[in-house]
Amino acid sequence: MTKAIYRREHVIFLQVLRRMRVASGMTQAQCSTALARPQSFISDVERGVRRLDMVQLRDLCHVLDSDLISFTKSFEQALSCGNAETIRTTTAKERH
């Protein structure tokens, strides 16, 4: 089996994460500050150098005014389309 970091799904996962951050209007620095982490943390995550566990992903979603359910739906939709470029990510404010 191919290592996860080289799989198409992982590339799309990273695309969805980055699109969610950009859609929130936050820079990597702002996002990192909200997580009490250095800016390099978000850069490493978005480049696939650092992996997130479920708790970290949840924290990141909340900082980006989203949640795990919305992220997962966007991720699954992107997988079915083949990329994240056609997926519109929504924030919690937009859903309410």
Image (cartoon, rainbow, N blue to C red):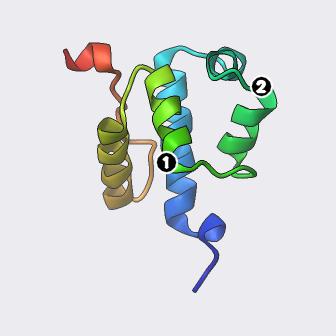
Nearest the viewer among 8 and 54 is: 54
In this rendering, would 85 be left or right of 95?
right
Using a 10 Å C-alpha cutoff, classify the residue at mark 2 as few (fewer than 14 neighbours), some (14 to 19) or many (20 or more): some
In this rendering, would 73 be left or right of 8?
left
Measuring 71% from the left and 46% from the top, which residue is drawn there? 47
Q: Position of residue 18 (x, y in %)?
A: 56, 35
Q: Say which quadrant the N terminus sits in.
A: bottom right
Q: Amino acid at mark 1?
A: Met
Residue extending furthest left? 96
In this rendering, would 35 be left or right of 13?
right
Query: Tag 1, which secondary structure?
Result: helix
Nearest the viewer among 49 and 7 is: 49
Q: Position of residue 51 (x, y in %)?
A: 65, 52
Measuring 62% from the left and 20% from the top, which residue is drawn there? 31
In the rendered image of this protein, does residue 11 appear above or below residue 25?
below
Disc 1 marks which residue? 54
Disc 2 marks which residue? 39
Q: Position of residue 50 (x, y in %)?
A: 72, 49
Q: Position of residue 83 (x, y in %)?
A: 44, 53
In the rendered image of this protein, does residue 55 appear above or below residue 82?
above
The image quarter in which residue 93 lies = top left
